[in-house]
Amino acid sequence: MPSSVDFRSVSVEPILHDINLQIRAGEAVAFVGRSGAGKTTTLRLVNGLARPTAGEVLVDDVGLSKTDLIALRRRTGYIIQGSGLFPHRTVYQNVATVPRLLEWTDAQIRPAAEEIMGKLDLPLARFGDRYPRSLSGGEQQRVGIARAMIAKPSILLCDEPFGALDPIVRRDLQDAFRVLRSGVTILFVTHDLAEAMRVAERIVLFEGGRTVADSSAATFTKQPLPLVQRLVAAASLPA
Amino acid sequence: MIDEVLRATGEHILIVVIAVGVAIIAGIPLGIWCARNLRAGRVALRIIDAIQTIPSLALFGFLIPVPLIGGIGMRTAIVALILYSLLPIVRNTLTGIRGVDPIVIDAGVAMGFTPRQLLREVELPLAMPTIVAGIRIATVVGIGVATIAAAIGGGGLGTLIFRGVSMVDSRLILAGALPAAALALVADVVLSFVERRLVKG
């Protein structure tokens, strides 16, 4: 079940100032903007990796200050640049991390791992026993996605997940990602507008710790705001 | 003669194993604490560092008049060796834990590891090769310092060396020196092997 996320006058001084955002359950929202604009901090507020200095973040209408953060994190997927895979654990053990924390049995974990890894073009039989170091950057990131998605999270937080990959692998992963995006609320940080338009249906633009534009992906580029037009010009979007 | 060398070697191993064992049991938690409380940890490390710089024979000298742990004999030797072994183990535990990739820690926290689970399942396993390197250094240094412990009646292979020196008997000196050197080399090789096996992936 996807969750709703609600930012109510949230500040994280000195980075974020008075953020107000309502994200509906099941929505896929991209946060775009320059480095240091506050996108990542906003994302990290949702799983309690960053704490507000004022205001409140609500998930399914419950304030995070009243929520068991450990339980919330176990149903929140998190995908980051560089994947953050455990180097001392095999691909299968990495993918099985959250199910193990949730105390699933092996009989439950294996089929779930087969399914999610199959969808990501990572056959368990071929990849399960390998260590992350032996994989390519794109494969590592696929394992990172499988690890984040296996337990069917209600929210998926993505922080520049494809930032370090070459353009072709990046495109492949964006396509793989689109297949998985039903049934989960997605917050996706990127500075690539073309990527934002491919993975999300709504785009929020950050600048200087504030949200300065918020619209559907389809109409985002039509806005006259100079910063939007500069982003569009920089993104070399398909006509 | 053979009997005596074997007995002294056994004694030597016993001293080092007890001392390094205690240093591991105390040093790893202390190193974890230092990694969590970096400022206080630096002070703790500085103190242990200062102990390490005291020449071993002088440290034995300082310990002899201390009640309960001091005096002449094996107990004082073991206490001194524990103090010596502590530094590499505490420092390497600290270095190993601080050296874990912060992105990996971030991912672990974000997936809902409790702090205890994160320590046991991520930080300690990834720090383990470094910690074992500390144990190896502690053991090799300990085997060396333990030979000097004979000067305060600590027993071990040093007894043969000191006796050989005073009797100007080079066979007796070698009967102590060769096994001591061999022990240090074997410990180094075995623990280096363990260290390498722990690096996975």
Image (cartoon, coloured by chain):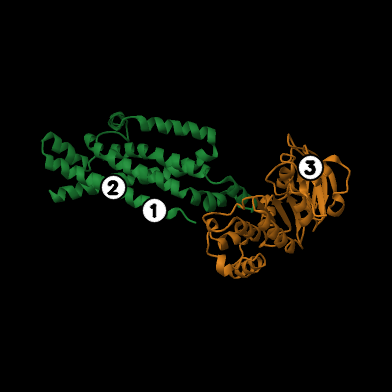
Chain colours: A orange, B green
In this view, the residue in front, A168 or A160, is: A168
Please provide percent x and percent y for residue A2. Answer: 77, 59
Q: Are tags 2 and 3 found on a single chain?
A: no
Amino acid type, callout 1? Val
Q: Based on the displayed image, in which of its 4 quarters is residue A123 positioned?
A: bottom right
Question: Considering only vertical position in the picture, is A106 above or below A220?
Answer: below
CB under 8 Å between discs 2 and 1: no
Residue that appears at 71% across and 45% down: A40
The residue under label 1 is: B194
Q: Chain of mark 3?
A: A
Using the numbered discs, state the Cα–Cα distance from disc 2 to disc 3 in whole angstroms. Answer: 61 Å
* Image quadrant where one finds the C terminus of chain A: bottom right
The x, y position of residue B69, in whole percent, is: 32, 35
Q: Which mark is residue A206?
A: 3
Q: What residue sits right under mark 2 in the picture?
A: B185
User: In the rendered structure, the residue with mark 2 lies on which chain?
Assistant: B
